Image (spheres, helix red, strand yellow):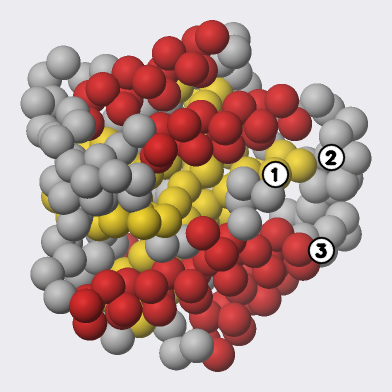
Amino acid sequence: MSITKETELIAMKKVSDVVAYALKEMKNYARPGISTKELDNYGAEILQDFGANSAPYATYKFPGWTCISVDTEFCHGIPSANRILKEGDLINIDVSAELDGFWSDNGASFVLGDDKFGHQNLVNASKEILKKAILNIKGGVKISDIGDLIETEAKRRGYKVIKNLTGHGIGRSLHEEPSEIANFKDRFNRTRFKKNSVVAIETFIATDSNYAVTLNDGWTMVGNNGGYMAQHEHTIVVTDNQPIILTEKNEIWN
């Protein structure tokens, strides 16, 4: 969507505060010994307390309030009572929701407790690359140039990017135009970021794979060449200068 009046910006800030708070609190609640279903239930309670609806359920009938992926699961992991979190797990939580007709999206990967398997460098790379990408976005900038920046930074650190997972426009629905904000230089995409538009910017930084493939459950995605992936995401408003980071209260850069 494009922000055309102050009331729309206020509404986007409201729903963004909700998803950001839910993500932060879910990260804090995660601990070894609980299931991803228990963690999802906790997030659901937060969203429901604010009167918000799960965006993946509302849009796609996803079987959970949030997406929780663990270790070699890249994204869209289904919360399960059988998936028990362990010390050192690489966890990704993606929280998106609708409130009063406005939609916002954010996500983060993190290591649970002690980094016993060495995932923290990957997590740090994803966070830092997202920050650099967002701070380079303004009206008129080519979307493909931001993709080029993300892939260049990933390669410089020894990582790859997932080419079939992208950021997207958001606001009046979960996925809007621009439909693809890729993590690489897509020479066929000549679209530019538009001032006042609302977009969800995501990094998909991986150790071994360039593409994500869907498992038999119809939702969970893993790497075509295995390995691990870290994702971080903010919903922002594009301006003539630095963007307004609507989901900044998730504190993923702290």
**Vertical relation: 115 (above or below) 46:** above
Q: Provide the secondary structure element on which disc 3 rests.
A: loop
On the rendered structure, is 216 left or right of 91?
left
Q: Position of residue 185 (x, y in %)?
A: 27, 18
Q: Which mark is residue 240?
A: none
Percent x, y for residue 94? 51, 55
In the foreground, 30 or 235: 235
Distance between the alpha carbons at the discs numbered 1 and 3: 16 Å
Residue beneath the point at 41% across and 62% down: 246
Reading the image, the residue beneath label 1 is: 110
Whether label 3 touches label 2, CB < 8 Å:
no
Horizontal arrangement in the rendering, residue 75 relative to residue 69 (left or right):
left
> Which of 198/79 is in front?
198
Quarter-of-image position of residue 139: top left
Report the residue at 59% width, 10% height from top: 158
Q: Are marks 2 and 1 in contact (CB under 8 Å)?
A: no
Q: Which residue is mark 3?
A: 34
Residue type, numbered disc 3 = Ile
Mark positioned earlier in the residue sequence (1 or 3): 3
